[in-house]
Amino acid sequence: MILVKKKSTPPYIISTLGNAMETLMFFLLFVMSNMVLSTKLSNDHLSRHSGGGQLVELSSSYCLSWRLATETNNLHGWRTVPIQCLRHVEAYMIRGQYDSDMKLIVDEIRNYIDQLVLSDDGMDAWILDVDETCLSNLYYYEGKRFGGDPYDPHAFKEWALIGICPGIPAILGLFRNLVESGFKVFLISGRDETAFGLVTVQNLHLQGFFGFQRLILRSEAYKGQSGVVYKSEIRRKLVEEGYRIWGNVDKMIGLLIDGKQYSLEWSSLLEKAAVPTAFSIGNLPVPMDLITSEKS
């Protein structure tokens, strides 16, 4: 039998390998600690509320709560979507949830319409808003980071004057259903009558909105008034003309009753209002759709 002597690793090689492993481990720990620190600093920065600087939970639940508060007009004194919610708003608008919300509300409106018995005098009326109801400004707001940039009335005017706002499919279907059912459909917008009159009519026709009774835009007499005051006055005048307004579809319903402004207080509001039923549709979160004197 031949015995082969096993060669041992020289001590200096063991020492070198040990030093290399220690160096590698130190490097990896250094990189990981920096990544953790960087992530923490980034999250601390993002989790500050854009208005008051208070720390808020950086999670989807916060953004859901924020969106609900804005859509019900319970959050005031801010100008932009919080930075940690920009992706949330973008996803809501372009990944199907906005369209799903629209469809659900329009289905409910159709159920309500099916229960109505209209007269044959041609005075049964329905009101639709224009921006973010009949026409979408999604492409414009996409360029404004879905509310990450403050509302810019001059930029919005330039966009609207192009006249290429796409129609919202669910509302277009509802509009056609209303016309076919015998309603006189009035389109009411806060857009300036002089600047936007012709282009708005053309834009509506381009998107398939034919057969409305009247498009009412803001005239000189209503400049400077809030959207709630202006639209309430228009509704009052339509009632004085003899129209029975069965419903109103708008971004956010606000009515002026006895000199006081009400918003989304349905039960008490509708008892006194000229509109028996009002629907607030799924809407671009404020300030993507700031209700301003120029646009509401």
Image (cartoon, rainbow, N blue to C red):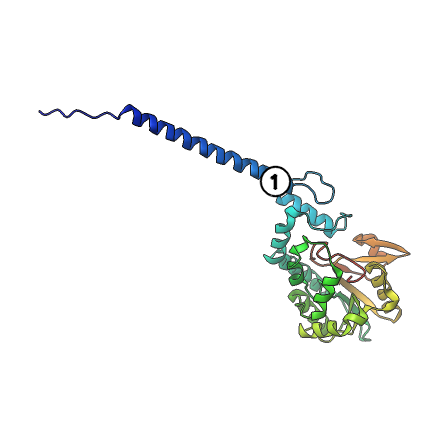
| Residue 211 appears left or right of 225 | left
Above or below: residue 145 compared with residue 50:
below
Q: Nearest the camera: 51 or 120?
A: 51
Image quadrant where one finds the C terminus: bottom right
Disc 1 marks a residue whose amino acid type is Asn
Q: Nearest the camera: 7 or 67?
A: 7
Residue 251, how many percent across, how many down?
74, 59
Packing grade of label 1 (10 A; few <14, some 14-19, many >=20) is some
Residue 12 lies in what quarter of the image?
top left
Residue 178, how many percent across, how many down?
72, 70
Residue 107 lies in what quarter of the image?
bottom right
Residue 215, how many percent across, how many down?
78, 72
Identify the residue position indicated by label 1 in the image: 43
**Secondary structure beneath label 1:** helix
The residue positioned farthest toward the right in the image shown: 258
Residue 20 shows in this picture: yes
Residue 283, how many percent across, how many down?
70, 57
Residue 99 lies in what quarter of the image?
bottom right
Q: Residue at x 14, y 26 (%)?
A: 4
